[in-house]
Amino acid sequence: MVDAKKWRLFVQALITKLEYPKGALELKIVGNQVAIHHSGEGFSPLSNVAVFEGGVSEFRVNRETGRFIRTYIGGYLGGDQNSDTPWMEIGKCSPF
C-alpha cells in the first residue's frame, strides 16, 4: 500500500483568458513567463471541461468541480530506454 502523504505535490498554476483567439485559455506555472499548455476552445459549454494541449502532454480541468488530470506520454511513445518515463497527475484546483 502506498502512503499518500509521500506522494503529495503542490504546484501553483494559473489559468488565464487570452484576448485572441476569443475564448482561448493558457496554463502557466506561477513564476514562469511561458505557458506550458494552451486551450484554443476554452471551457466547453456542455461539460465545463477545458482541454489544454502541450505537445506530448495534456491538461484537462473541470471548471465546476475543480478536478484536473495532467498526463505526459512522451517517453512511452518515443521508445527510449526508460530515461523519460510517462506520468499522470490528478488533483483539485481552487481559485486564488
Image (cartoon, rainbow, N blue to C red):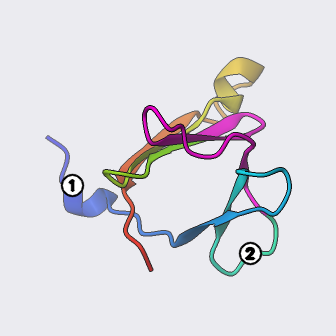
Q: Nearer the viewer, residue 63 or 73?
A: 63
Q: Residues within 10 Å of mark 1 (few under 14, many from 20)?
A: few
Q: Residues within 10 Å of mark 2 (few under 14, many from 20)?
A: few
Farthest left residue in view: 1
| On-image quarter of the N terminus | top left
- Disc marking residue 4: 1
Please state the extent of the stretch shown in magenta in the rendering: 35-58
**Residue at the image position 64 percent from the left and 46 percent from the top:** 42
Q: x, y percentage for residue 82?
A: 64, 30
Q: x, y percentage for residue 68?
A: 42, 47
- Disc marking residue 32: 2
Q: Secondary structure at mark 2?
A: loop
Q: x, y percentage for residue 22?
A: 78, 52
Q: Secondary structure at mark 1?
A: helix
Q: Nearer the viewer, residue 62 or 89?
A: 62
- Disc marking residue 69: none
How far is the residue under mark 1 from the one under mark 2?
28 Å
Farthest right residue in view: 20
Residue type highlighted by circle 2:
Asn
48 lies left or right of 44: left
Q: x, y percentage for residue 19?
A: 81, 63
